[in-house]
Structure formats: structure tokens, C-alpha cells
Amino acid sequence: MEAEASDGAVIMETQPQQGEEETANNGNENEETTTAGEITATHPYIPHNQLEQTLAIIKPDAIDRAEEIISVIHREGFSVLQARRVKLSAEQAASFHQDMYNADWFQGCVENLSSGPLLAMVLSGPGAVRHWHQLLGPSSWEERSKVPKCLRNKYGVEKDDHKNALHGSESSEDALRELHFFFPELIVEPTIATNLASHYLNQNVHPVLTVGLSKLVRERPDDPVIWLADWLLANNPNKPKEQSLNQPGKCK
């Protein structure tokens, strides 16, 4: 299905599933095929359990090694929620890099990003923004060559500052803007990790639900579903307290 990026770039939406090949046609090139999947892992150096979403781009200079790079992404424990293969115009690439408009390297970044098809991906995982950015390493050749195991050093073009293979959002704010550039209909919000969700259910949901189900068994109404729904609404512990109009209150 065709979709438009926030600046009008025509792209094709894919929903990657494990073990399946996804095909995307950007409308300007022949059909391109990429493989994406999903895996879960934990990393001891990630300091919190909050799941985040971040943007990852395999740039035109590394697109031929996309399958290999995606395998690395899987091994690092990211889930690939969506992937789109697209060729940007120079104007669209400039719009994406608008925050570095006055930088000396702006023109080179725009030329590289619009030089051919790229693969944009929504990555999800614990501390995804920081984790992915750490894996990439420095952007310039001089700096990334000092970190031989970083992905930009491994997949980037030697002695070329602009052809550094990969892009990642530098902050949560950047991730929100950049994700919406390629995936304008994407809902980006923090997600509670499994253990935190279980704790919330045990502390806040199960006790109330247990009482309601016990009363349901005793009452035996004709329509148990409607009865339970009404009971939960009436006994919601988070229900706002109503204040009488005759009682003084504070304006907030």
C-alpha cells in the first residue's frame, strides 16, 4: 500500500514478519526486496526496562549489505516493527537533515542520502535510542576508525565522512520527528516492559477484578458480562471523586 512521508515522499509500507521477505517499490526504482524479522534479548548495560522506538536507516552506500546489517540488528535484541525502502529526492533529504542546515557537512549528507535507495526501519527495544546510537559509533571517518568494532566503521566507506553506512536518532525527541518523517501514521510512545506490566496488573487490576468476580458468582445475573462491566465502572478505584457544588474547592 502506498503512503506518503511527512514531506510528500512516496513510499511503500511493509510489515516485516519473522522469516518472511518484504518487497517495497518506491515508485522510482525497480522493486527491491529486504528481509526483516523480530527477536527479543536483554542487555545488562541498558539501565532501564522501558521499551523505546528509534529510527534506523541503512544508507545508499551500504544498501547492498542490508541483509547482513539486519542480522546484526536482530542479534542485538531489537524488534523491527516496520521497514520501508525508498529513494529520497535532494529536497526531501534536505528536509530530513534540516537540523544541520548550517553545518559544513550538510551538503555532503544530503547528497549521500539522496544518492540511491535506502532502508528506513522502526526499531524497538529496551533503551532503543541509546542502544542503537552506541552500536553505530562516531559519524566521521577519523573518529569511527578509532572504534573498529562500531557498525559505521565496519560498513562505512573508508576515509569518507559522509558515507558512513547507517543513521540513528540521537535522542528521543529526534526519534519522534525522524520516525514521523518516514512513518507519518506511526504512534510513538513509551511501552511498559513485561515485568512492569505484570506488576501493575497484580497491584491495581487483579484485586478489584477478584472482588467483582466473587460478587458475580453470588449474584448470578442473567447477563454476567454486562453486570461485571457495570460493577467495574462503579467500583473503579481510579474513578475521579465528585465534589458537591456547595463545597469550597480550589481552582488549579
Image: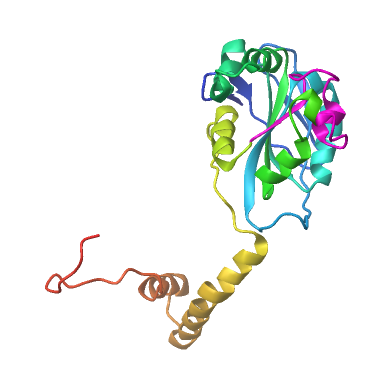
The answer to which quarter of the image holds residue 119 is: top right
- In reply to whether residue 145 is colored magenta, the answer given is yes
Q: Is residue 157 left or right of residue 7?
A: right
The reply to whether residue 4 is in sight is no
Q: Nearer the viewer, residue 8 or 170?
A: 170
- Give residue 171's quadrant in the image: top right
Q: Is residue 51 above or below residue 181?
A: below
Residue drawn at (59%, 37%) of the image: 175
Q: Locate residue 119 relative to residue 200 in the image: left or right.
A: right
Q: Residue furthest left?
A: 246
Left of 107 or right of it: where is 189?
left
The boundaries of the magenta stretch are 144-169
Q: Quadrant of residue 115?
A: top right
From the image, give the main secondary structure of the stretch colored magenta.
loop
| Nearer the observer, 109 or 66 | 109
Please say whether residue 110 is one of the residues in the magenta stretch: no
Residue 217 x %, y %: 50, 85
